[in-house]
């Protein structure tokens, strides 16, 4: 499967500008290429203008969903659509949409873990449903959002459901950039799966975002990396046979004894 990752410098508090930016990027990068799947970063519609989300959040995805579905069909690509601020059920959520190349919404995930360091709990509601896997082109996959990366049980639950690829969409700050990298390597190794991330670059309210989007294979080896703290496009090809090979050679999942692990 061939991936294209947008390490995007999000225009803060300007959803229309960001939609135009993504559309232009896809026209430049996806056209005339053999890309299967595109990954966008976290909160690409509004950025971290959390105190303005009441006016900026997309009501039930009415602006973002038609936009994403049209792009998927136009370019015939699957889209791991980062995440956007969404108003629904009387609250605001940090929500990721997964769109297949036919324009169908195959999965919706609300970010479970909200970031205290960026005051997310003051402005957003956390997801209330267990993370689930989805399929694109017959491949079982999962998605998590930024701070979720710090909770290994979430990604492990997706892998136990059958995921071979996990996507991480983020606006992870430079202040904790080493954690961003090392946690991804750890998750890939312990779960013997591909980990692909799309992080933001740029600045919002004094917070600099780290960039360094990564593609890591199930043995924990780096496939591709984006540059630090600047906008970039990352291309990578993953080989799902490697997941099967690593899991066979180091049989972690048949060696598990979960009844001895406690809660």
Image (cartoon, grey):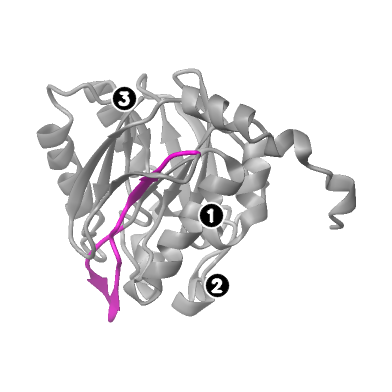
* Residue plotted at (44% across, 49% down): 168
Task: Left or right? Give the position of 182 relative to 64.
Answer: right
Residue receiving disc 3? 36
Up/down of 45 relative to 79, above or below: below
Of residues 77 and 87, the one nearer the viewer is: 77
Q: Quadrant of residue 76?
A: top left
Looking at the picture, tell me which residue is in the foreground, 34 or 190.
190
- Residue name at image x 45 percent, y 67 percent: 179
Q: Secondary structure at mark 3?
A: loop
Q: Using a 10 Å C-alpha cutoff, classify the residue at mark 2 as few (fewer than 14 neighbours), some (14 to 19) or many (20 or more).
A: few
Image disc number at residue 186: 1
**Label 3 or label 1, whichever comes before in sequence order:** 3
Q: How many tags in the picture?
A: 3
Where residue 155 sits: x, y (%)? 60, 48
Lower sequence index among marks 2 and 3: 3
Q: Residues within 10 Å of mark 3 (few under 14, many from 20)?
A: many
- Residue picked out by circle 2: 121
* Disc nearest the viewer among 2 and 1: 1
């Amino acid at each position: 499967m061939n991936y294209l990752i947008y390490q995007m410098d999000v225009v803060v508090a300007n959803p229309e500008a960001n939609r135009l930016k993504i559309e232009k990027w896809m026209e430049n990068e996806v056209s005339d290429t053999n890309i299967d799947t595109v990954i966008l970063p976290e909160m690409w519609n509004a950025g971290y203008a959390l105190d303005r989300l009441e006016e900026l959040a997309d009501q039930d995805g009415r602006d973002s969903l038609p936009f994403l579905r049209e792009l998927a069909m136009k370019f015939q690509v699957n889209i791991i659509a980062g995440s956007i601020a969404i108003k629904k059920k009387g609250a605001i959520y940090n929500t990721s949409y997964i769109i297949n190349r036919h324009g169908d919404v195959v999965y919706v995930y609300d970010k479970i873990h909200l970031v205290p360091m960026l005051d997310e709990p003051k402005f957003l509601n956390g997801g209330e449903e267990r993370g689930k896997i989805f399929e694109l082109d017959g491949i079982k996959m999962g998605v998590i959002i930024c701070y979720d990366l710090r909770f290994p049980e979430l990604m492990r639950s997706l892998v136990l459901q059958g995921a071979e690829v996990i996507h991480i969409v983020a606006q992870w700050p430079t202040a904790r950039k080493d954690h961003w990298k090392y946690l991804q390597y750890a998750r890939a190794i312990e779960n013997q799966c591909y980990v692909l991330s799309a992080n933001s670059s740029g600045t919002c309210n004094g917070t600099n975002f780290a960039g360094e989007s990564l593609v890591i294979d199930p043995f924990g080896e780096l496939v591709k990396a984006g540059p630090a703290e600047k906008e970039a496009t990352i291309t990578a090809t993953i080989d799902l046979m490697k997941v099967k090979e690593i899991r066979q050679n180091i049989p972690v999942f048949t060696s598990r004894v979960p009844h001895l692990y406690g809660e």
